Amino acid sequence: MEKLGDAEKDLFRKSFWLMIGTLYMNLMSLLFWIIASRLSTAEDVGYATTASSLIMMLSGVLTLGMDISVLKYGSSRIKNEIFSASLMIVAFSAALTSIALVIWQGRGLYGEEYRQYIMILAAVYPLFVFGNLLSVALVGAGESKKVMFIRIITSTLKVAVIIVSAAIIGIINGIIILLSFSIPAVIGAALGALYVRSIYTIRMRSFQLFREALRVGVANLPQKVFGVIISNLGTVLLAFFTSNPALVGMTYISLMIMLAISGFAGVFSTVALPQSVAKNSEVYVHSLRYGLFITSALAAPVGAASWWILSIIKPEMAHAWRTLTMLTPVAVLITSVSNVITELNYKGKNREIAILGATMIASLFVFLYAFTRLEGTREISIAIALILTYAIALTYVFIGLKITWLLKNMLIALAGTCLGAGIGVMVSTQIHPVMGGLIALSVVVLMYSLIFKVVTIKEIILLMRSVFST
């Protein structure tokens, strides 16, 4: 049997509870939108999703990366000062954003009827932002299980609100959909504040630490903006460049599936940052191994059965399977770059983090524009643009920053994902997509556990035992 250190066990245990919370939240979110789309008009769903995207974009950019500062120092001796500084900065930013929303009132967006949506958004925005910051603070302090509880409660409440509203009224509109994820935001912020009270103390003893919180946050802002562009603005850019709503819709679904895969495994790099700082150890090396294994194990089956998955969502989407299949290796690249950013944050290389994020933003704009111009690559333009963007980012990492320790693990994950998905696609078309997905998963496990022994089955068993033994 293989021996595991306390760092690996601690990392996996805390990441496991966060993954469970993330999985439950994603499943309930899917259920929520299925119910919403069936019980309301397409116009109402459009209004609500616009408001949802708007709040995600604003919180991703205007909180100035303070969540990264809180995460990094959440288990260190200066956690109270960093938390206090970040809280002050976010409070100021949230107040200004809400005031701006009240002044704007949605002018130029849809019409007069959308004003009430923006007013609700202005009221709930600070609570949404604070709820997210408090959850990150809990992760930074090693309290992943508490975050899991918050996500389970708020996600369940979101679905419950819309079901109860539908049962009472019979049909739901955009306002009810918006309130269905606004009310849980209030509960989430309250629960986060309740948990945080016993862990952090509001204290500001040094302006230097205030500057440190701001410095770390602003350095991470470009890469956070890049994440916002992928999840919210990427399809908007595609719409602008192609003027093809059907293509945009199918691309959006594929993109969300890919981001769900990378986000699920990304919890390892999230948990690894505060642990690396607290232990003064390179814990992120293990987060890369586990994160890439899970990413590859999820991405390969999805790539193999892509046409079947898309047809379940909507039959006419099945012909867009190439986009989803090509996006699966992108999930591996996202996990790799996330761990690089964790290392750079751990080592305090703020300038390099900012350059990396800015480079990725510029590359995505250039490549997306270029490949939407070409007839042969238009349908898969987002996949090609993302692959090349991450290729440039990793070139900067390997050559410019001379960070090569992740290369072996990344190449194994890419090989497993591409080989598994390739063989799986053939099996899916000839036999059945479920069989194709299982074959793809088997290829990944074979490469990881038996051929290269990066993450063995015995190690996974030991890690799972450590989760439930405490």
Image (cartoon, rainbow, N blue to C red):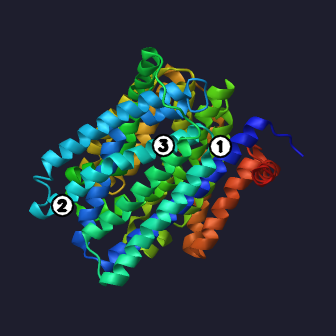
Q: Nearer the viewer, residue 349 or 61?
A: 61
Type of amino acid under label 1 = Ile
Residue 239 rendering spot, x and y as whole percentages:
23, 54
Residue 338 vs 152, above or below: the answer is above
Assess whether mark 3 and mark 1 are in contact (beta carbons under 8 angstroms): no
Q: What residue is drawn where x is 33% and y is 52%?
A: 377
Which of pointers 2 and 1 lies earlier in the amino acid sequence? 2
* Above or below, 176 relative to 5: below
Q: Give the residue type that dot 3 points to.
A: Leu
Mark 3 or mark 2: whose residue is earlier in sequence:
2
Residue 378: in sight, yes or no?
A: no
| Residue 164 in sight in this render | yes
- Could you tell me which secondary element the residue under label 1 belongs to? helix
Q: Amino acid at mark 2?
A: Gln
Residue 230 position in % (x across, y down):
37, 47
Query: In the figure, is residue 110 to the left or right of 333?
Result: left
- Mark 1 / mark 3, whichever is N-terminal: 3
Give the labeled residue for mark 1.
Answer: 412
Residue 218 occupies which quadrant of the picture?
A: top left
Q: Which residue is mark 3?
A: 134
Residue at figure coordinates x 57%, y 72% from the top left: 433
Q: Which residue is mark 2?
A: 116
Q: Residues within 10 Å of mark 2 (few under 14, many from 20)?
A: few
- Front disc: 2 or 1: 2
Q: Residue furthest right?
A: 1
**Tag 2 and tag 1, C-beta contact below 8 Å:** no
User: 10 Å neighbourhood of mark 3: few (<14), some, or many (≥20)?
Assistant: many
Q: Of helix, strand and loop, which one carries label 2?
A: helix
Mark-to-mark CA distance, 1 and 3: 36 Å
The image shows residue 247 at horizontal and vertical percentages of 29, 62
Q: Position of residue 273 (x, y in %)?
A: 58, 33
The answer for how far apart the CA atoms under marks 2 and 1 are is 51 Å
